Image (cartoon, rainbow, N blue to C red):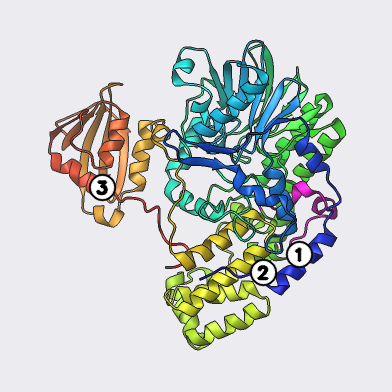
Amino acid sequence: MEQKPPAAVIESAHREHLTALPFDDTADFDDADRGFIAALDPCVIKAADGRVVWDNDAYSFLAAEAPTSVHPSLWRQSRLCAKQGLYEVVEGIYQVRGFDLSNISFVEGDTGVIVIDPLISTETAAAALALYREHRGDRPVSAVVYTHSHVDHFGGVLGVTTQADVDAGRVAILAPEHFTEHAVQENVYAGTAMARRAGYMYGAALDRGPQGQVGCGLGQVGSTGEVALLIPTVDIRETGETHTIDGVEIEFQMAPGTEAPAEMHFYFPKFRALCMAENATHNLHNLLTLRGALVRDPHGWAGYLTEAIDTFADRTDVVFASHHWPTWGRDRIVEFLSLQRDLYSYLHDQTLRQLNQGFTGIEIAETFEMPPALHKAWHTHGYYGSVSHNVKAVYQRYMGWFDGNPGRLWAHPPEAIGPRYVEAIGGIARVVEIARNAFDGGDYRWAATLLDHVMFTDQNHAEARRLYAETLEQLAYGAENAVWRNFFLSGATELRDGNFGTPTQTASPTLLGQLTPEQMFDALAINVNGPRAWELDLAVDVTFLDTATNYRLTLRNGVLVHRKLRADEASAQATVKLVNKMRLLALAAGDNSSPGLEITGDAAALQSLIGALDRPDPGFNIVTP
C-alpha cells in the first residue's frame, strides 16, 4: 500500500496556521545560528564496523518551504533542530548541536575541558569532541557532568573519557543524587516495553522526508551507536552546593522529580551562564512521555523554575540547555524562564481546578486552552509534549486511570470490545462504510476509533487495514506535535508493512553491568511467570565471589524474594557461586556452561527457578492484536 497525499481538509488547516501563527518572528533562527563556528561535512557518523549511527544529512529536505504534509509550525521547529555544528555560547563555553537527539556542551577550564551531557552514543560523542578540539585545541577532558538520568545525557560517555581515566582520578564525573539508580531502572525494569513504544514515538523506522519522519520536536532522532555508563564519582545533593573543577566554579540547584527523577541545574559565575538541563527547552515537554514513564510533577517543575529565576537571573547573561539553542540577555532570559514556568504551572493548576468540578482527564484535555501569552510564544508549543496528553497526565497523577464512572470500571479489553462494537453497528462492512464516510468528511479521529475496533475484530480485513493506514497518515500530516506524527505514521507503516519491532535498544551490556545485585534480582522478579510458578517452593543461595556476598532467593506463590543473608547450604536447595554479577545475567539468559559458575546441591531447583522466567518481547503488537 502506498502513502497518500494530504487531504484537502489538512491543507486548508495548514494555510490557516500560516496566517494565524507568528512566522514573522525569526528570533529563534538568529539565536540558533549565533556563535556558529563550524559544521561537520558530511554529518554522517559511523561505528567501527561501518554502520551508520547518525545521519543528520538525511534531513537536508528541511531546507525547502513547508510542504502540506507537515504542520508548518512543526516544520519550522524541525528546521531549527536540524542545524548542526560547533557553536560558541559565550567565550569559554561551546556546544555541539545536531549530532544526536541532545546537545553536548564543553566548558573550558584552566587546563582541560568539562563535558556536559555526552549524548547517547560513544560514536556521536567522540565526533563532537573531535570537532570541538579541531577548532579549540586538544584539551584533555577534566570532568563530565550528567544533568539528569535519561540515556541521551550519559550514554556516549565512552566517547569522551575512559573508565581508566576515571579510576585514576584524572576525570571526575558529577551527577545529581540517585542518578545511577534511576538511569538503570528506567532502561531495565520496563525497558522492553518502553523501547518498543519509543520506536513509534521517535519514528526510528520511518523514512525521513516530507511524508515521513521530520524530527521529534526535542531534536531529530536518537543515535544508534554504543550506549555506556560510567558511575558518577561526585554526587550532588543540595541546592547551593558548589564545586570547583579545573579552576571553574559551579553552583548547583537540585531539581528532582521534574523532567527526570534525578535532575539538576547549575550556574557558572565565571561565564555568567546558567544550564537548565532539560527543564526549560524550546517546546512544551512531556509530563508523561508517550513511550511510557512515571508521571512527572508539573507543580514541582514550575517551582524549581521560579527558584532558578530568583537565584540566578540577575547574574546571568545566557541560559542554555541540553536540547535546542541558548537565550541571551537578562530580560529575555527572565521572560523565557517565566513563560516556561507558567506553562507547567497553568497545566497543573487548571487541570486540578476542572477535575475538582467533576471533569475527567479526557474531557479536560478536549477543551483546555492556553492563555494567549503562552500560545503566541514559539517555545511553549507542543512539539514534544502536548497540552492534550499532558493534561491527562496531571489527571492520572492525582486521580489514577479510573475516571469515577462505574460503567467504565470494568470495560472489556480491545480484543473483546472490538467485535461487540462491530456486531452492534452491523458488521465489518458497515463499520468500514461509516469509517469511509468519516474519512471523506475529514473526521479522522472518529474513523480511527471505528477502524481500531475493526482491527481487533479482524486484523486481516484488507479494506479496513488500508483505510486505517490512510486515516492515521492524515492525522500525522495535521499534527503539530512531532511524536504524535511519529506515532500515527508508525502505526500506518506497520499496518502496511508489518511489525518493525524495536529499532533501537538502550539496555546495553555496559548499562546492565551497572545494576546492583538487588536491582538484578528485581529484574528477575519482574519476569517470573506467576501462574507457571504457583506450585514452586524454592530456596536458592546466590554467592558473588568477587564481593563475598550472598543472597537467599525464595520463590513461593509466584513471587521471587531476595534477602542478603549468610549462605546456608543446609537450608538452601541449591547454592550458586558466581564469579561476579555479570555472570548472573548470563545465567539468567540460559548460559549454564561458561566459566565463572559453580552449582552445588539440587541443580534442578535452579533450573526450575530459571524456567519460571519469561523473556520480554521487543516485538509485541501495538496497532493490531
Q: Which residues are magenta?
A: 368-385
Residue 613's disc number: none
Q: Earlier in the sequence, mark 2 or mark 3?
A: 2
Q: Is residue 108 above or below residue 187?
A: above
Q: Which residue is mark 3?
A: 556
Disc 1, disc 2: CB below 8 Å? yes
Provide residue 87's location: percent of width, then percent of height: 71, 30
Residue at x-position 76% and y-position 64%? 14
Q: Label 1 is placed on what type of residue?
A: His
Q: Secondary structure at mark 1?
A: helix
In the image shown, does 173 or 1 lie closer to the viewer? 1
Residue 147: x %, y % from top left: 61, 31
Say which quadrant the C terminus sits in: bottom left
Quadrant of the image occupied by residue 407? bottom right
Kind of residue indicated by mark 3: Arg
Res. 141 visible in picture: yes
Front residue of 163/44: it is 44
Report the residue that reaches farthest toward the front. Answer: 41
For mark 2, what is the residue?
6
Q: Is residue 405 visible?
A: no
Name the foreground residue: 555 vs 272.
272
Q: Residues within 10 Å of mark 2 (few under 14, many from 20)?
A: many
Q: Within the image, what quadrant is residue 67 found in?
A: bottom right
> Which residue matches tag 1?
14
Left or right for 552, reference 309: left
**Residue 535 position in % (x across, y down):** 21, 53
- Residue at position x 30%, y 44% in the image: 560
**Foreground of the two, 362 or 621:** 621
- Is residue 127 part of the magenta span, yes or no? no
- In this view, the mark in front (1 or 2): 2
